[in-house]
Image: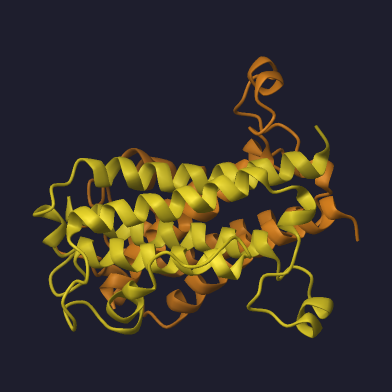
Chain colours: A yellow, B orange
Amino acid sequence: MTNEELLGITALNSWKLVLGRFDQNLAVLTDEQLQKQVAPGKNRLLYLLGHLTAVHDRMLPMLGIGERLHPELDETYITSPDRALPDPLSAFDLRKAWGEVNGKLTDAFERFTAADWLEKHTAVSDEDFARDPTRNRLAVVMSRTNHASFHSGQAILAK
Amino acid sequence: MTNEELLGITALNSWKLVLGRFDQNLAVLTDEQLQKQVAPGKNRLLYLLGHLTAVHDRMLPMLGIGERLHPELDETYITSPDRALPDPLSAFDLRKAWGEVNGKLTDAFERFTAADWLEKHTAVSDEDFARDPTRNRLAVVMSRTNHASFHSGQAILAK
């Protein structure tokens, strides 16, 4: 294995590790428990799940992997604060959407070569990318991995 | 720049971005505010700062960068839960330690080549590393970056 291949695989492992831990915690929560807030007056666990699902769904077109699967989540879980709008999906369907989105992303990442990781994402212009080649797909995935860790830290407080 | 150099730099950016955001939030908190708990009955902000400082300090020998700077933090901030032991440093000195430790790490990372990132860390045996070469320094740094994000998500709740 070349250095560049190994670097890509190491980065992908980090994504899988963070999502795997999140899913382990999610699996032991009932749908009722997902209505709990992470702290008094803060977001519900269900909101965090919807938020992460919507943000990850946006990566599909952003990384050139495919069309969005769940654009209906954005208004409730990205644009609006928790409880401003009714939940568009049941907890059951949201768990399913979360699994589908991450499955599709991870399948694509597994096939990425080092050169694929270093391609520009669609939210950066050719000009900006020429100036700063670190605005690549790997940067997006690492940023989303950190974002998932950030909200995992909050979700764990509801335990 | 080669692909492998660019992958290393992209990963390092993620570490710097997460710490930079944490530091921005830390800078606007008074020492008194660091005594606040992130949620009722949960860790104080000062405990999280001590915990992250101790965990990052441990990376110095783990990644072959140097001796530990603050081993005195482990008992209070790694081995024990919050408030079990008195804080060994003032908030002022803990902030200073946090900056020193991260400065020393980041300076070393800035000089890492792709091959350096892929070296084994000292907490894995030669045998295990031969079996799984993803147990390298990059994996440690990405894991600690996610760990810092995890606690950043908690710290933000105290706002």
Indicate the quadrant containing the C terminus of chain B: top left, top right, bottom left or bottom right. bottom left
Quadrant in which residue A117 is drawn: bottom right
Which residue in the rendered view is the most extreme toward the top? B127
Q: Residue at x 8, y 54 (%)?
A: A32
Is residue B50 shown left or right of residue A63?
left
Q: Is residue A71 above or below residue A49?
A: below
In-front residue for pair B43/B100: B43
Q: Residue A75: where, in percent of width, then height?
A: 32, 81
Regarding residue B96, the answer to whether it shows in the image is no
Q: Residue B10, percent across and down?
A: 71, 61
| Residue B18 % position (x, y) | 54, 66
Q: How many marks?
A: 0
Q: How far across and down, in percent of the image, does residue A46 sit?
A: 21, 62
The residue shown at (42%, 83%) is B28
Closest to the observer, B50 or B108? B108
Point 37% across, 58% down: residue: B48
Choose top left, top right, bottom left or bottom right for residue A4.
Answer: top right
Q: Left of B127 or right of it: where is B55?
A: left
